[in-house]
Amino acid sequence: MLASGRVIPRYTPDELSRLWSPGHRYATWLAVELAACRAMERAGVVPGGTADVVAAKMGDLLERDPGAADEIDRIERTTRHDVIAFLTFVERTVGPEARWLHRGMTSSDVLDSSLAILLREAIDLCMVRHERLLAALAARAREHARTPMIGRSHGIHAEPITFGLALAGHHAELARGLSRLRAARDEIAVGKIAGAVGTYAHLSPAIEADALGSLGLRAETVSTQIVSRDRHATYFAALAGVAGAIERLATNVRHWQRTEVGEAREAFGTGQKGSSAMPHKKNPILSENLCGLARLVRTYAMAAFEDTALWHERDISHSSVERVIGPDATATLAFMIERATALVEGLVVDSERLYRNLESSRGLWASEAVLLLLVDRGVGRQEGYEMVQKHALRAYASGEPLLDLVASDPEICARVPAEELRAAGSLDHALRHVDAILERALGPASSLSPSAAPAGERI
Amino acid sequence: MLASGRVIPRYTPDELSRLWSPGHRYATWLAVELAACRAMERAGVVPGGTADVVAAKMGDLLERDPGAADEIDRIERTTRHDVIAFLTFVERTVGPEARWLHRGMTSSDVLDSSLAILLREAIDLCMVRHERLLAALAARAREHARTPMIGRSHGIHAEPITFGLALAGHHAELARGLSRLRAARDEIAVGKIAGAVGTYAHLSPAIEADALGSLGLRAETVSTQIVSRDRHATYFAALAGVAGAIERLATNVRHWQRTEVGEAREAFGTGQKGSSAMPHKKNPILSENLCGLARLVRTYAMAAFEDTALWHERDISHSSVERVIGPDATATLAFMIERATALVEGLVVDSERLYRNLESSRGLWASEAVLLLLVDRGVGRQEGYEMVQKHALRAYASGEPLLDLVASDPEICARVPAEELRAAGSLDHALRHVDAILERALGPASSLSPSAAPAGERI
Amino acid sequence: MLASGRVIPRYTPDELSRLWSPGHRYATWLAVELAACRAMERAGVVPGGTADVVAAKMGDLLERDPGAADEIDRIERTTRHDVIAFLTFVERTVGPEARWLHRGMTSSDVLDSSLAILLREAIDLCMVRHERLLAALAARAREHARTPMIGRSHGIHAEPITFGLALAGHHAELARGLSRLRAARDEIAVGKIAGAVGTYAHLSPAIEADALGSLGLRAETVSTQIVSRDRHATYFAALAGVAGAIERLATNVRHWQRTEVGEAREAFGTGQKGSSAMPHKKNPILSENLCGLARLVRTYAMAAFEDTALWHERDISHSSVERVIGPDATATLAFMIERATALVEGLVVDSERLYRNLESSRGLWASEAVLLLLVDRGVGRQEGYEMVQKHALRAYASGEPLLDLVASDPEICARVPAEELRAAGSLDHALRHVDAILERALGPASSLSPSAAPAGERI
Amino acid sequence: MLASGRVIPRYTPDELSRLWSPGHRYATWLAVELAACRAMERAGVVPGGTADVVAAKMGDLLERDPGAADEIDRIERTTRHDVIAFLTFVERTVGPEARWLHRGMTSSDVLDSSLAILLREAIDLCMVRHERLLAALAARAREHARTPMIGRSHGIHAEPITFGLALAGHHAELARGLSRLRAARDEIAVGKIAGAVGTYAHLSPAIEADALGSLGLRAETVSTQIVSRDRHATYFAALAGVAGAIERLATNVRHWQRTEVGEAREAFGTGQKGSSAMPHKKNPILSENLCGLARLVRTYAMAAFEDTALWHERDISHSSVERVIGPDATATLAFMIERATALVEGLVVDSERLYRNLESSRGLWASEAVLLLLVDRGVGRQEGYEMVQKHALRAYASGEPLLDLVASDPEICARVPAEELRAAGSLDHALRHVDAILERALGPASSLSPSAAPAGERI
């Protein structure tokens, strides 16, 4: 069965593919019609037992038999209206009782309540994957809690961090992403059974509350013909946010893997080939792929924002957009989260190289500590800055250890004892708060693994 | 004094202009430096009283004297680093005590904590305006709670609503917008005083918590060199959402005002001229302007999303973007909210025309009610649809009242008594739940004003 | 066979679906490999006749047998490299001669040259449809060249135009769109056969020129590993431009069709149903759909712009984006053009209603002509403006004919003879240049049809 | 005088600041009015000499005296219409002759023709800077035409290129950008003097052609009230394209400068400070800044695309967008081009480090050459791939030279003589076509400078 949305197989987990299949979509429509019918039965508007009859006759036909969706599509070619085609099909299958379905309702009562259910299912599939991604990040962050690494700003060596701290930062950002997914799930879990222009002309707020409640949805505060699209824009923006957080992680993996850095790299499978021309290549293709997919998820949010300003009590311009971005954005994000999880779990971390890179700038990172020692001795901040910068720029150019240079500067030594200057390069000191940060980000440190730093270089 | 951001005067409320002035920006930097300094004094790292001395010597120089900002800019032309230029200026003004400022801190400790404060101030200025917009909408919605109006989907007459209900829908959407602004305010109220790469190498989490707490900020869970930009993307997306909600309102005003509809229009000032060529013109220019501005606020969010995937412990590519969109997005949105409030307050509603338009389709809107009467009598839904559609399409083409046509169809009359057919066109019945919806959206109905429907047409 | 891209069936013409099928994609890869192989044969690098052997053994297997694409996908699951999987499949099918394929080439030589071919084919399918759309617009514009209509700015009546003029404006914009598609076709018709990093390390510029020339492509000026992505961004921006032009047309149809305007409407099919609730509805759903699709095509261009800044000699982040937007943007645009053509061809124009709407403002549109008469008699422009505006605002409010009001103003009559004031309302005069504009836009006027204005109201 | 647009000083060249000042804007309006007036004089519609009188009385008041713009703004606060405020000011300054100005014209005749002139001036300022950028790139490309460098795909070492080749690639992309700017200039150089709804009701195509011709503009094919906004969207998309090309260059500089790569870096000024915390830092801040600015220019194009689908003969929603993005996009791009030029001119290239990095993978890049030697001897491509990949992966892990490993593999040596294997690592051979590529991109090679490769390592 063809998907109702597009759902490119390459970037779509199977569960998402099923979720967005026409069969599942039509089955969700039926569930909404039945929920509304039962609420009307309870309200005495529709004869009791109607929904049971319809449910029994329909069974799981819609999800089971692809022919059903095909037939509905065929009817739609005449009616040019999808919900009428669906109802016609149900009426043909069920017989006279079906006439009670959709009583006082408009198509959007079915479509929007169903869309809420489908988007909620989709984001649930994202969130369950997201938990796994967070778990993987937490585990690797703890594993490398004490693996020293040079921190970089502007791509330039700054001061030491640990590899676990870098991962913990991604964890914290993605954990915020999960909170936003949860909020989006809540925002979107809203339906309507309020009729053509939201006035309950042939319904009532009570019937709506009953019907939606049985589907786990709340009622829109004020419906037009539809549920307001600001909710959907918020939903897709939340997806874009998570995609952006994954993009940051993937970007960093790409940096770590580059030949000259070599600090971490994607796992490389048996039989895998990196290049059709160059047999020596091992490329961070998963991460690059994730960066591209993030662009897509981001642009889908733009289209969703443009959908909000519909005309009067609604126009249908949002519909074509949502047919595409509903499946595409959720499937792509679910895929991204899965792929990011595999990426993190399989990440090959080279602790030796991390340490070598840290050492390569010969202690240049201690420049701030020296500056502070001078300030503590009464040197003005900008004056001290220039005293240190002079040596730092020379160390940078020549490769000489910074602390040797400052220790041989009489002006500096006159103020700061040599042993204090030496101590400025202590990794232990620089990283003494890392455990506390990780605990703040990941919870109690009980599971902090032993350091992965090379022997003799424990921090 | 030139604004540090751009802040186009035409679309910038004065308060926002002051907020984003260089003087206020530098004063905020100083506030952060002083808060950090005081926390370090309390921690015993910096001599007690330092901050007091600096504060006393600086006074309100930065906000008061535009020359201060100019001087800082001049220094920056040499250092090519804004925070160092600022500190140099403070050191020159204050003398030796200033060397204790910024101890162990990196520029972003100041910049990001300050940006949090500025963005929080800016969103506060938006929110206070937003409350007024909501109040205006609520008042006008109550005023027109019972002013009947034809609801429209696809721009085509559907079924009756009231003008107040339409406004209540905008109120509900904008009220959600306010909730999202509140959430964004909470997300952005996060700073860092964690040093060059977030490790507190020369600081401590306790100092940070103390300093930020005194500024009303929380500490970032895991800092890199900066506060993570997912927070900012979320912030700007919330602004875009509100802009989109205003765009929907403005779009509807544009529809209501068009010559053929004429149901409501923007107030037209004395001396106002609609066109340089055509003296007869009264145009919905405020609303059109709001639609354009919404496009801008929306695109700023896109740029913010692109800012999230920074390299390693940070790169500075986000900075130029934020220098522009920080002022521009918040000032534009604050302006939009102000303008939308004036628009709603001044909206000239033509109740007669509303009623005339409703009547113009001669009861066509009752088609669904007739269909349901047939279904209640055992007619299949699709069969009944075609029985009614035949008359509806004729009524649409000829202008004959629909209920006359169906009442003269023997097949229909055989099933439904004529008086029931007639009753299908009752406005009272169609609108009986509107009060309940408004109460749900706006709170208790006590203040519901008397109907604004033309005399004799009360609903 | 599943599409290699997504290609949602609902919005994809069949030809585009075939174009983006995996079979056609692989067949295009083979065509590029064979073209390169033949060029190398001619250059004496590869044994003569190799390509013929491969071509004969492969036949049309790739396009004919879906099993081939499935098998290539299966191999890719091990190699994690699509081109290597493809070459492996060809080598298995063809035998030892296949080893000469891809000599000195990198995957992107095949992929980018193929993508150029596919994007060129796709834009050709768009352009052939676009010619039909332009023809339909030209025909309807000529048909209604002299059908008078009120022009509107800001949704408010301005001065008279003709319906044909409005369509001619859309024609002119879409004709520019076609020029941009042509330019985009030219920009994208560029391939590369330049090896791993564009240096022809095992190839030569001459071989590349020969191979690409036989495929109708030019060589990239300076390749990295790939063809530069600024070309693709330009291509997708051109698509977005055409989508925007269609959106403007569709937006206007939505306006024309609204109940209160009723000047033109989409054809309504037999058996079509406008609403599941309201049998009386005829909605401009095609036009609304087009507006939504335009949002999608626009956002795809954003993703393409983000693809340009790849790292070093390339990273592969653009690939996932292009797998989606290549098929999606082109298929959606081709669908939009088809749908827009049907919309224009079927558009039901109500000349009577057009005239009635024009008349409804009782000559208010002549206000500028009266102003100019006053100016000609020496009245200052702003003074004259206020003299006319006073009457215009009264006419607007009361419905009195403007020319009656000004003709009874002694101050005005003292300056302008009554018959000149009356003549200010001449449609003939107001529209005397319309034929010339249409001729400028559509070519010689020979085919201008007789006026469609109601009898007696010929212009 | 405050800018009419925003024009953030930090990112705005002075010339752009003047171009977008209110004074220059109003002077341009006057130029359009005078051009139209003179055309009407020649057509006998307006008394001869009128324009001369107006021009003489106005002089250069508008550009010279900031008070003029302030006064116009003051009038606008009453009229709420900018062009009427402008005409009122002119009428007050000039007296009765001014009443002939604007005859039969609508505001947009002035505004859109003026906008065309301003946007053309702005893009001219971009293009003159762009020529300098191209010259700088060409010079540096030639300087380093033969400076060997490792090419990288996916951030991983691939095969050798030269630094000049990399720059030539940026040159070629930016040269295409210049062509697109030229095309955009041509697209935008279109005005209209066609009256309220484009019908020339009180004008004529001949007057328009005469007036616009004297301003160097063409007439819009079919005007509505305005020039069609597809032209402006195309214009801003062209800017976005150039911004993206600069972003790619800046991204590569950031990569080259990173500590571990160190192949090229931004010039670092005397007195410059890289970090407020760390005196040792030299950061690629210009390049990072350019990447951020590119995001802004890109998003402005999105807003321009959204502007195209205006309602009927126009709505004014585009106006607020253009007030912002007109100045902002052009000023930002002009600034970017200037900054990129300085970046390229000042780029410090480290030829030694380039060579060291190339050598660091110990000949791994020759893997493709070895593969081709095997294929030439009859080994199947995929079989050969695996024979080489085995050694390449080992070399990658151990640091052993690849050619040593393959030369000691009996299976390989049995097929390929050792000296041929050794020759596979020849830089001269790998780079033999680079001169030809540079000549293709930059023109005749006469000016190719001597190699910048370290002595003894000439290629």
Image (cartoon, coloured by chain):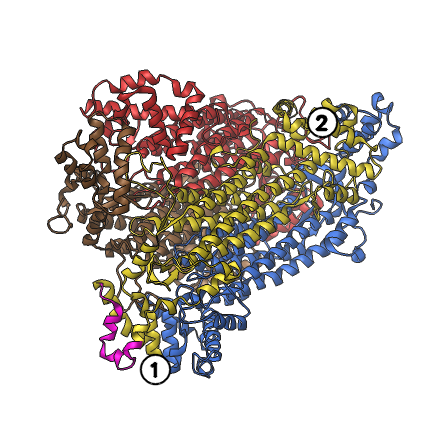
Chain colours: A blue, B yellow, C brown, D red
Q: Which mark is residue B58?
A: 2
- Is disc 2 surrounded by few (<14), some (14 to 19) or many (20+) residues within 10 Å? some
Relative placement, left or right, of B212 versus D452 is right
Where disc 2 sits, the SS reads: helix
Which of marks 2 and 1 precedes in the sequence?
2
Question: Does residue C388 appear in the picture of this structure?
Answer: yes
Which residue lies under the disc numbered 1?
A: B378
Give the x, y percent position of residue D112.
34, 33
Q: Amino acid at mark 1?
A: Gly
Q: Nearer the viewer, residue B225 or B173?
A: B173
- Looking at the rendered image, the quarter that the N terminus of chain C falls into is bottom left
Q: Is residue C313 above or below residue C115?
A: above
Q: Amino acid at mark 2?
A: Met
Give the x, y percent position of residue D418.
62, 42
Where disc 1 sits, the SS reads: loop
How many numbered dots are placed on residues in this image? 2
Give the x, y percent position of residue B405.
23, 71
Q: Nearer the viewer, residue D165 or D425?
A: D165
- Is disc 1 surrounded by few (<14), some (14 to 19) or many (20+) residues within 10 Å? some
Q: Is residue B414 magenta?
A: yes
Q: Is residue D422 magenta?
A: no
Q: Which residues are magenta?
A: B399-419
- Looking at the rendered image, the quarter that the C terminus of chain C falls into is top left
Relative placement, left or right, of A330 versus D77 is right
Q: Residue at x 36, y 70 (%)?
A: A84
Question: Does residue A276 appear in the picture of this structure?
Answer: no
To which quarter of the image does residue D256 belong?
A: top right
To which quarter of the image does residue A341 belong?
A: bottom right
Give the x, y percent position of residue C438.
20, 41
